[in-house]
Amino acid sequence: PEAITVQELAQRMAEKGADLVKELFNLGMMVTVNQTIDQDTAELLVEQFGHNIQRVSEADVDIDTTEDVDPEESLKARPPVVTIMGHVDHGKTSLLDALRGTDVTRGEAGGITQHIGAYQITTKDKQKITFLDTPGHEAFTEMRARGANVTDIVILVVAADDGLMPQTIEAINHTKAAGVPMIVAINKCDKPEAKPQKIRERLLEHEIVVEAMSGDVQDVEVSAKTKQGLDKLLEAINLQAELLELKANPDRDAEATVIEAKLDKGKGPLATVLVTRGTLRRGDIFVVGTESGRVRALHDDKGKQIKEAGPSMPVEVLGLGGVPNAGDQLSVVENEQRAREVSAYRTEKANEKRTTMAPASFENMFSALK
Ligand code: GTP
Ligand code: MG
């Protein structure tokens, strides 16, 4: 049977918790606001206060997307989402910058007008690849723990002049735990002291057998500095992506995952999201975490206004009611009322989590007095 705390019921009826406790006392029950009451008692109270009873299930007041699977025939190919991991100073950011430089859609003069936490490039052979910028291992693990497994492929960056370091091993373990395929980028190969073969040998100790050692993990020697090997790395990503047969339904209400969010002084709350399925459009009404909103504008990773964003595309969203958290799911809903309802329900649930202490049972209360 459903149980509800007196406080929660009071909030839903917009009445004072103390008034409910008083009414319960009149009905012969000694209960505090933090205690739960059963459904029959709750309904009795609701009637006493002259409200209508509305039995709602979780599915009515929240969004459950786990049951909502897209039919096979609706699925279309989508670009891979690639996360770069590795030890401090091994060249993750430099490599990302160098890869961004290979983007054929980025005009000579255009340059990098805006930095967002995720971006997409188009390779020479017209393949799109989405990169997640410096998420850090903690962010990766945290997002995964929250069910936001957005990464399709991990690129493990190892500096050839330094070898396997603690964070390299951490990255290997996180990647294995996530069950995400890995490509090893042996970086800084321009350096005279680079020893790429030694890296391959050391990787064996962690059960990573690269192709050069007759294994099945792709390894590429690169240099973010001289741009050596970048084309090979892009090829490796595309090959891996093909094997994964990544697909999503672009023709439905959008769902997306928040990569990062902040409050901008001029523009208000901003979130960079990665569309996981459907197509996000200007004007769409959505819920994201406990916040709701309406898409006022969409910007791509070059700061350009766009009208819509499909699967695997990172976009900056304007029009949020507040700042969501990284890893929060954004879901487009049918109307504002629905958005408000879901966000109110989630806010209430979040507050409840914060404020309720373990409610003492009747027996506990009395035995404590003995
Ligand atoms: P954190 O974000 O601090 O973890 O570092 P990172 O992994 O992003 O490394 P970053 O790209 O900041 O590079 C660290 C240093 O290595 C910088 O001084 C880079 O210029 C240098 N570096 C990166 N890639 C290469 C490379 O391929 N060759 C050489 N010679 N230097 C490189
Ligand atoms: Mg960096």
Image: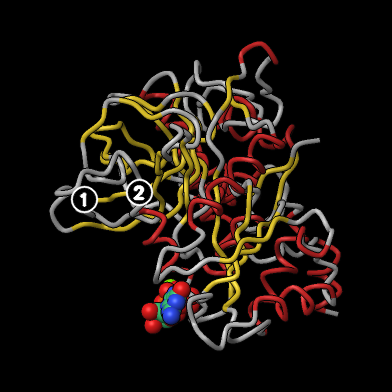
User: Which residue has dot 1 on it?
Assistant: 268
Q: CA distance from mark 1 to mark 2?
A: 10 Å
- Foreground of the two, 189 or 293: 189
Q: Considering the image in quadrants, where does the C terminus appear?
A: bottom right
The spot of residue 141 in percent (x, y) is 64, 63
Q: Is residue 301 left or right of residue 173?
A: left
Category of crowding for the residue at label 1, using alpha-carbon neighbours closer than 10 angstroms: few (below 14), some (14–19), many (at least 20): some
Q: Quadrant of residue 173?
A: bottom right
Residue under the point 27% across and 25% down: 307
Q: Is residue 49 left or right of residue 169?
A: left
Residue 314 higher or lower than 221, as above or below: above
- Foreground of the two, 15 or 326: 326
- Foreground of the two, 367 or 217: 217
Residue under the point 26% across and 39% down: 299
Q: Quadrant of residue 38?
A: top right
Q: Quadrant of ligand 1?
A: bottom left
- Residue 294 visible in this rendered orientation of the protein: yes
User: Which residue has dot 2 on it?
Assistant: 271
Question: Type of residue at label 2?
Answer: Ala
Residue 303 higher or lower than 169, as above or below: above
Question: Type of residue at label 1?
Answer: Gly
- Foreground of the two, 126 or 325: 126
**Residue at the limit of the structure toward the front, as seen here:** 192
The spot of residue 109 in percent (x, y) is 14, 49
Residue 309 higher or lower than 106, as above or below: above
The spot of residue 241 in percent (x, y) is 63, 39
Which tag is nearer the camera, tag 1 or tag 2? Answer: 2
- Residue 13 visible in this rendered orientation of the protein: no
Category of crowding for the residue at label 2, using alpha-carbon neighbours closer than 10 angstroms: few (below 14), some (14–19), many (at least 20): many
Say what secondary structure mark 1 lies in: strand
The spot of residue 114 in percent (x, y) is 23, 54
Q: Considering the image in quadrants, where does the N terminus appear?
A: top right
